[in-house]
Amino acid sequence: MTTTSAKSGRSRTRTAGEGGPRRRGRGSSALASERREHLVKLAAELFAEKGFQATTVRNIADEAGILSGSLYHHFDSKESIVDEILAGFFTEIMASYQAVIAEGRNPRDTIAGLVRVAFGTLEPHRAAITVMQNDWNYLKGMDRFAYLIKSEDEVEKMWVDTLQTGQEDGLFRSDLDPKLTYRMIRDTVWVAVRWFRPGGRLDAQGLAEHYLKVMFDGINLH
Amino acid sequence: MTTTSAKSGRSRTRTAGEGGPRRRGRGSSALASERREHLVKLAAELFAEKGFQATTVRNIADEAGILSGSLYHHFDSKESIVDEILAGFFTEIMASYQAVIAEGRNPRDTIAGLVRVAFGTLEPHRAAITVMQNDWNYLKGMDRFAYLIKSEDEVEKMWVDTLQTGQEDGLFRSDLDPKLTYRMIRDTVWVAVRWFRPGGRLDAQGLAEHYLKVMFDGINLH
DNA sequence: CCACAGACGTAGCAAGCGCTTGGTAAATGG
DNA sequence: CCATTTACCAAGCGCTTGCTACGTCTGTGG
């Protein structure tokens, strides 16, 4: 079925897409960016499933029902697609984190809020998180993604500050390294994208509550 | 420096290698497998650093100071190299796990032992674990690595059984899902490979003790 | 001293990669 | 009705990929 091009020019079977009447010509720019966002989402799923490098521009184009070259009408490069995916995720989660911090509650509630926010992004941003997990090592080496490292440092500061304040207030044990503890929490949350499936036994918030119990009080019976 | 081949045949500068006298001809088969293991280790480092797919056979050969074609004297394919890496890791860790279980101690001590074993592999098998983390999604899709999934299931059973017994014995809280708890523990341990560096502030066993404290009793001050 | 086998180099193939160029059908605005 | 813009197709370029075929060098056992 991937046999290229029947003889007549305009006969490509479009394997994907909603099959509706093809929109051509100048749509409103709002609709144009809708198309763009749709392509980004398709790409994100593929990146998450097979990895960024293993996903070819032809894969993405196939999924969208167009040819690989046509992708370059919408995007500069393959990198710019994954950039859009990750940037969207980062701006949203950092805003959510800031909102929790801004509530100004005690460190325990703040940490709980951050954990709930993190688990809350698991479903809407599953693909982005997966890409971040699997291809981080590769992507961070590229200049264009230097901003990701900067954002991650800001996030780390939020968590570590909250943990430290909690220790000073006598809410958390003082024999724990805040940085190490933050990493433990962060990794445990994000890594859940590997086995978390939206329709499963537990939803994201159920996971969050389960995790909060273990994190705050441990698995021991007291 | 990668300019190919000066005019005279035998003048390749060998960029890597210990520079000792080149061993040729029939060595003992023990030494032959030594060479093989050395190549596997080089490849493992590259796979861990750049990812399996992003690492080319030419990268590996460069690191070894030979040409890419010469690699195929030692290995069938690029896949067979990563196979050797992962298989070695899995057989060792499963043996270690079995040994802990066989001690027959109480569930709390057994879990602690498993955690210590896991952290203990962080240093000697850093590359293998990194590959498993980053390229798992890609590798598990290939028939040749189906055995990895089977091994993982066996490991899961060990942990979950121990956790359940602990709950029945009144050692662990009963309001936790054993499977979910196992995954939390597993992920937190392995994911540490991303930021763990052998010469750092804390060694692997220090990490293990830090983690055991949090896992058993939580971060709350009791 | 010589046949042998292991350990490489040399050269290159077929396939696939990201991306570019130039053209074309369709919708829109004036 | 026509100029313009959008969204695509068709074709392919330059390069890299994993891998192969075959020749060459070298230490070793007989």
Image (cartoon, coloured by chain):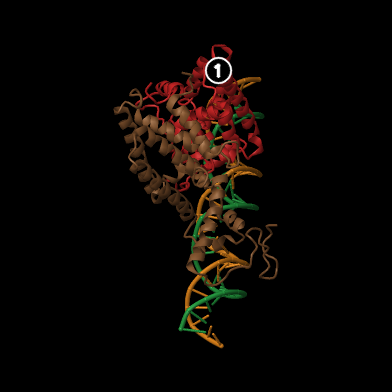
Chain colours: A brown, B red, C green, D orange
The structure residue drawn at horizontal position 49% and vertical position 62%, both measured from the top left corner, is A33
The structure residue drawn at horizontal position 40% and vertical position 51%, both measured from the top left corner, is A144
Q: Secondary structure at mark 1?
A: helix
The structure residue drawn at horizontal position 36% and vertical position 36%, both measured from the top left corner, is A159
Q: In the rendered image, which quarter is residue B218 located in?
A: top left
Q: Is residue B137 above or below residue B95?
A: below
- Quarter of the N terminus of chain A within the rendering: bottom right
Q: In the rendered image, which quarter is residue A16 located in?
A: bottom right
Q: Along the line of sight, which residue is nearer the eye, B137 or A45?
A: A45
Q: Along the line of sight, which residue is nearer the eye, A124 or A146?
A: A124
Residue A15 spot, x, y in % from top left: 66, 58
Q: Which residue is mark 1?
A: B166
Q: In the rendered image, which quarter is residue B198 located in?
A: top left
Q: Is residue A64 above or below residue B174?
A: below
Residue A113 spot, x, y in % from top left: 41, 38
The structure residue drawn at horizontal position 44% and vertical position 25%, both measured from the top left corner, is A217
The reply to whether residue B74 is in sight is: no
Residue B215 spot, x, y in % from top left: 46, 24
Q: Is residue C2 left or right of residue A102?
A: right
Q: Along the line of sight, which residue is nearer the eye, B7 or A84?
A: A84
Residue B103 spot, x, y in % from top left: 56, 11
- Which amino acid type is shown beneath numbered disc 1? Gly
The reply to whether residue A203 is in sight is: yes
* Callout 1: chain: B
Total numbered labels placed on residues in the image: 1
Q: Residues within 10 Å of mark 1 (few under 14, many from 20)?
A: many
Q: Is residue A7 left or right of residue C20?
A: right
